[in-house]
């Protein structure tokens, strides 16, 4: 019974696996390197559909809809907003450089250096930067909050439904670490890495 529960929840090793290794605790899974794009799309997929424990049937979480298409779409929307905001920042810098050189170079003869159009266009670019940055930041904050709730609820559900063998083989500090340090890193570092990309 313990092996079927461990397999159903995805946590811990079965009795026979632990006996084969001769260890009292299981080895912690760990990955290093760059964050792959699939992690971001799964993160956004969790933001689209909040985990609902009522959808789980007999410890089988495979029947829960995973709106991965919506996660990919939100990922593309967020990336597009960030790229557009950066394009507006670069455009305003270039426009300001052209404006500063205009009295000497005269790149645009129809717009003299003292024309108010230089200021109007630069102001529109700054407004565009502000609006796009606000929308991208708000959307990402909202989605990050929903993803954090969903990931925390999934983790809590799986830990509470884990067989006793899991608690025998997993140190308490590792379980607490999942709910403190690991969740905190996902909540703070993953969004920061995405926006810095």
Image (tube, helix red, strand yellow):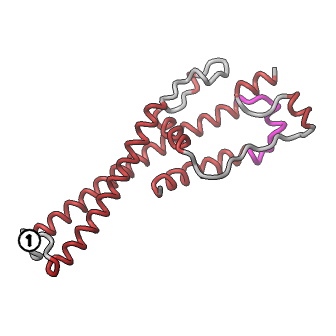
Q: Residues within 10 Å of mark 1 (few under 14, many from 20)?
A: few
Residue 54, horizontal then vertical, whole percent = 57, 22
Name the residue carrying label 1.
109
Is residue 191 left or right of 77 when viewed as pictured? right
Residue 126, horizontal then vertical, whole percent = 25, 62
Residue at position x 19%, y 73% from top?
A: 99
Between 14 and 102, the one lying in front of the other is 102
Task: Name the image quarter holding residue 123.
Answer: bottom left
Q: What stretch is highlighted in magenta?
A: 161-174
Residue 7, horizontal then vertical, whole percent = 74, 26
**The N terminus lies in which quarter of the figure?**
top right
Please check the rendered image and state whether residue 159 is part of the magenta-colored stretch, yes or no.
Answer: no
Total count of labels: 1
Residue at position x 49%, y 31% from top?
A: 68
Between 21 and 94, the one lying in front of the other is 94
Task: Name the image quarter holding residue 133.
Answer: bottom left
Between 104 and 151, the one lying in front of the other is 104
Going by the picture, which residue comes out furthest to the bottom? 104
Residue at position x 55%, y 24% from top?
A: 64
Between 86 and 169, the one lying in front of the other is 86
* Above-or-below relation of 56 to 70: above
- SS for callout 1: loop
Going by the picture, which residue comes out furthest to the top? 58
Is residue 21 left or right of 147 when viewed as pictured? right
Residue 165, horizontal then vertical, whole percent = 82, 31
Is residue 113 left or right of 59 when viewed as pictured? left
Q: Magenta: predominant secondary structure element? A: helix
């Amino acid at each position: 019974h313990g092996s079927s529960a461990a397999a159903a929840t995805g946590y811990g090793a079965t009795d026979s696996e632990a006996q084969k290794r001769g260890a009292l605790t299981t080895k912690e899974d760990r990955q290093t390197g760059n964050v792959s794009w699939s992690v971001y799309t799964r993160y956004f997929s969790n933001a689209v559909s909040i985990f609902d424990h009522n959808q789980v049937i007999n410890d089988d979480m495979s029947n829960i809809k995973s709106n991965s298409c919506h996660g990919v779409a939100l990922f593309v929307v967020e990336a597009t907003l960030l790229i557009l905001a950066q394009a507006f920042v670069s455009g305003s810098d270039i426009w300001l450089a052209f404006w500063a050189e205009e009295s000497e170079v005269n790149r645009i003869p129809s717009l003299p250096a003292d024309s108010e159009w230089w200021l109007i266009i630069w102001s529109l670019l700054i407004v565009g930067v502000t609006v796009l940055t606000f929308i991208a930041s708000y959307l990402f904050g909202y989605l990050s909050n929903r993803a954090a709730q969903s990931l925390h609820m999934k983790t809590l559900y799986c830990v509470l439904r884990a067989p006793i063998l899991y608690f025998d083989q997993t140190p308490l500090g590792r379980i607490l670490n999942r709910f403190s340090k690991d969740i905190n890193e996902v909540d703070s570092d993953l969004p920061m890495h995405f926006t810095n990309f």
